[in-house]
Amino acid sequence: MKYKLEWKYRIKKGNSVYFTSDWMTLDDSIIIGEDIEKSQKGTELTFYDEKGTDWQLKELKKLAMEVEEEPHDFLIYFDGGYQKEEKLAGIGVVLFFHQGKKKYRIRANEVFHEMETNNEAEYAAFYHALNLLQELNVQGATCEFKGDSQVVLQQLSGEWPCYEEELNRWLDRIEKKTAELKIQTIYTPIGRNENKEADKLATQALEGKRIYSKMQII
């Protein structure tokens, strides 16, 4: 979950100006809120989360203590590769998250058989990412998904219609899984150059190289 801060900045002669921040992580929101309070230049600090709920600084601090040991701040890259002759899909997922004060990365790939199109491979990659979240016991988190398939991301967000029967079956599976996990999804289209790691994992899967790793990163 990310947060936006609004506050009133006092200037000379009793005048004031209202400011609104960009979206921030929970930890950054608390740090910046504390700095503004210490400066005694800012008043009426109010935080808003992505659901529109408003928070006070002391409430955010309490929330941070409650979720400190739970995985949070999920960012997921996914990609699917496809071999038409074999009807084979290689999928790759790179998942970043925080737990406590540490940041982790999971890299995983998989092979799916009897795939019909590259778009189906992309859906399989997205679904595999949801399975990784389930293995982490994620519940109620906000998760940002980044991929280079405009078709899949626009269909997942409901912006584009989906007429293919097989892809609609994947959409049904994904909708059911996201409901089970109670996650809030953010879909962000990116270029292929920004998705190289997930793409490489998908290629390695097609080459028979199976990968799963979890590591702490700086």
Image (tube, helix red, strand yellow):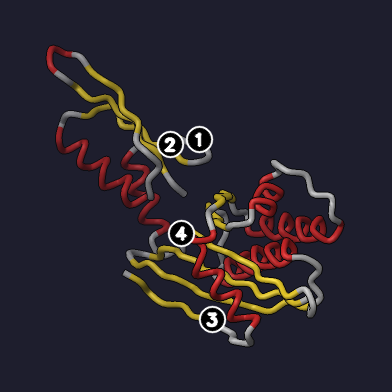
Q: Which amino acid, by three-letter code, is at mark 1?
A: Gly
Q: Which amino acid, by three-letter code, is at mark 3?
A: Tyr
- Cα gap from disc 4 to disc 3, whole angstroms: 20 Å
Q: Which residue is mark 3?
A: 212
- Residue at 21%, 36% in the rendered image: 36
Nearer the observer: mark 4 or 3; the answer is: 3
Q: Which residue is mark 4?
A: 72
Toward the top, the furthest residue is 13
- Closest to the observer, 156 or 6: 156
Q: Which residue is mark 2?
A: 48
In the structure shown, which secondary structural element does the residue marked by tag 3 occupy?
strand
Q: Which amino acid, by three-letter code, is at mark 4?
A: His
- Cα gap from disc 2 to disc 3, whole angstroms: 36 Å
Could you say which quadrant of the image residue 215 lies in? Answer: bottom left
In the structure shown, which secondary structural element does the residue marked by tag 2 occupy?
strand
- Residue at 50%, 35% in the rendered image: 52
